[in-house]
Every structure is written in C-alpha cells, then in structure tokens.
Image: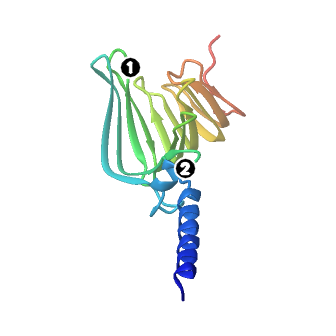
Amino acid sequence: MNKKNTYNILNIVMLICMAMFFSCNNSLKEVQKIGVSENEPIGVAENINLKHTDSGRVTANLISTKMLDYSNRDFPYNEFVDGLTLYLYDDKNQKSTIIADYAIIYSETDLIDLQGNVVITTQDGNVLKSDQLFYDQKKQWLFTNNAVTFQTKTDVIHGNGFDSDTKFKKAEVLEVTGIITMED
C-alpha cells in the first residue's frame, strides 16, 4: 500500500468519526435516563415522615413506609405502594386524618388518587369511607364516583359518589341510601 492510499483511507476514517461525533445529539434528559429503565422509578424513599409548614406552623404531616419517585416520566408522579397516613391541621391546630392502602400523587396536576380502604376522619368526628377517593389540591376538593359511607354524629349515609370541600362544609353524597335525620 502506498502513502497516497493510506492517506485517503485515514481521511475517510476521520470523516466518518467526525460525522458520528457531530451527529450525536443527546439532550440532558436522555443522558440522565441512561441506565434507568422507563418502567423503573428514578428514586425510592423509605420510612417517610414529611412535614409541611406554613408560617412556622405544621399544616400537614405525611407518613409512609415507601414512596417510588417517577418524576422521570412525561407525566411525573409519586407512588405510595404501601399506603400512607396524612394528618392535616387547621388554623386552630385541630387534626383531620386520611388513611389509604395505596396512593398516587400526580405532580403536574396536583391530583391525589387514594385507593383501598380510604378513611377520612375530620377533627369534628365525621368519617368518610370509600375504596377510592380523589383529592384536587388546587381546588381543595374531594370526589369519587365509587360507593361511600359518610358518618356524622347523628347519621350514617351510604351512596354512590361523593363531592366536598376539604372542610366538609359542602359535602354531598350522591345516590343516597341510609338513615338521615331531617330537621323540621
């Protein structure tokens, strides 16, 4: 092989290498995904005891044994596979409790999907039970189309569906059955 052929081959190899180098266009998100399967969480947290404060006062306390972080997805969310307990405190530091066997918190929409033996107990003793309940954090609204039991101090109301603000001031059980006390 003469020098001219060797020089031409070397130039061709250099051109191919440069073309390959400049054709690579990985964005930062794509580079971060290397080694992480699309179906795997980007993080796992165990034994969570998260407290949210407002002006130095605890307003919420989330407790869970395990959280899976899927913030690497196009529609990011956190999944609580072992369930959660959430304590909410009002301005007078009175506590309401939310318990669920499983939950998903969707980051972009601020929607929480509570599933499996969902029980909400308010500071004044009202109890709501359902298999699934949604909580819209932006609108401060609870809702479901599933069967519910809503128990107050005087009534036990069964129904198929529920809509309410978080303070249960505008609570409405849909398709009602049960014993209800009526005032004259």
Q: Does residue 179 appear in the picture of this structure?
A: no
Indicate whether 131 appears above or below 135.
below
Which amino acid does the dot numbered 1 rest on?
Asp
Q: Image check: 56 left or right of 130?
A: left
Looking at the rendered structure, the secondary structure element under dot 2 is loop
Q: Which residue is mark 1?
A: 90
Looking at the rendered structure, the secondary structure element under dot 1 is loop
Residue 127 location (% of width, % of height): 48, 33
Dividing the picture into quadrants, the one containing residue 51 is top left
Crowdedness near tag 2: few (<14), some (14–19) or many (≥20) residues, C-alpha within 10 Å: few
Q: Foreground: 115 or 169?
A: 115
Comes first in the chain, label 2 or label 1: 2
Residue at (39% x, 41% y) in the render: 85
Q: Which residue is mark 2?
A: 73
Quadrant that contains the C terminus:
top right
Residue at (32% x, 37% y) in the render: 50
Residue at (48% x, 40% y) in the render: 119
Residue 83 location (% of width, % of height): 43, 49
Indicate whether 172 appears above or below 131.
above
Which marked residue is nearer to the observer: mark 2 or mark 1?
A: 2
Indicate whether 38 appears above or below 144.
below
Colour convention of the picture: rainbow
Residue 13 location (% of width, % of height): 55, 73
Q: Image check: 2 left or right of 53?
A: right
Q: Name, please, the residue furthest toward the top.
A: 184
